[in-house]
Image (tube, rainbow, N blue to C red):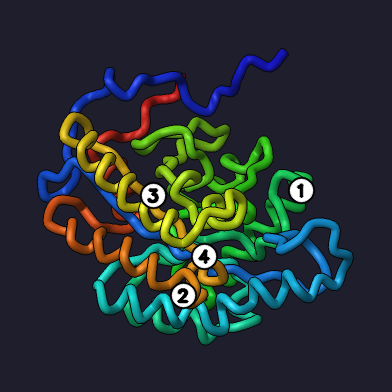
Amino acid sequence: MDSGHARYPYSAIVDRPAFEWPGGHGLAVYVALNVEAWPFAEGEGAQLTSGEPAPNVRAYSWRDYGNRVGLWNLLEVFDALDIPLAVNLNSLVYEQCPRVVEPFRERGDEIVAHGRTNGERQSRMAEPEERSMIAEATAAFVRHEASQPGGWLGPYLSESLVSPELLVEAGYRYTLDWFHDDQPTWLATGHGPLLNVPYPIDSNDSTVLQHHAATPAAFADQLIEELETYLELSTRRALVAPIALHPFLVGRPARLAQLRRALRHLAAMRDRIWLTRPGEIAAFYAERFPAPAPA
């Protein structure tokens, strides 16, 4: 029976060294916008209904709304509230709709590599195929952004047994793939350490709105309550509160007003938190707590 893994040892958060984020804050918050693309009539991805045969036009067009309309609705909100973003980007976006990346470059937002497309999973790839996928996606980011992203989020939030090794091999400094902690964690790999920055499941709009079928108001309430609880807990230990959004979900007019309410609450907390991006969290933590020596 497999009793666990060797990526990181157990560590109770109450036993760790105390520290503060920049500005003397206990809470770091970042907002991730997942900008994704899918092949037509093939691959996987969020479904409106189960069991639809290809081509699943309902699901494809539902998701495509995010890049055509929803993203632009959200940008107005982010700009009005001056909220920095991490853009978890599928490299296929450069082929399907390169226009959507332009405003994020102008804003100075961080690009996080999100694989080629959310129509595939690393967990289902053989090692050579996965290595090739990472290389292809990375080359697209370098070609369009003039530099490689520092971070990686697996498409469809999946990893194989060797994904961390392949990411270090490809030059990535941090990942968002593990959801086990409220502080960054060093992952051991066969090619050296890889830092994991917390990424949300509970405060992910895909989980709450799509899988749990919550109302827009309930999702906004959850974000506000979670931020306030994180803020209270952060008086005792430094924490990361991540928020993940998808344009094809919260960019819809039916959900936009309630999301704006939650983001206004976040913006009003600005003086009490470090409102930042995951790459900045990773850089600060790695300098404050360098990777441990291999066992």
Task: Identify which amino acid the numbered label 3 is placed on.
Answer: Gln
* Mark 2 → mark 1, Cα distance in angstroms: 27 Å
Task: Identify which amino acid the numbered label 2 is placed on.
Answer: Glu
* Mark 4 → mark 1, Cα distance in angstroms: 25 Å
Residue receiving disc 1: 125
Q: Which mark is residue 222?
A: 3
Sooner in the amino-acid sequence: mark 2 or mark 1 = 1
What residue lies at 71% left-to-right and 52% top-to-bottom?
121
Task: Identify which amino acid the numbered label 4 is placed on.
Answer: His
Looking at the rendered image, the disc whose residue lies closer to the viewer, 3 or 4, is 3
Tell me, yes or no, whether the two marked residues, 4 and 1, touch with CB atoms within 8 Å: no
Which image quadrant for residue 5?
top right
Label 4 sits on a secondary structure element that is loop
Label 3 sits on a secondary structure element that is helix
Residue receiving disc 2: 145
Q: Which mark is residue 246?
A: 4
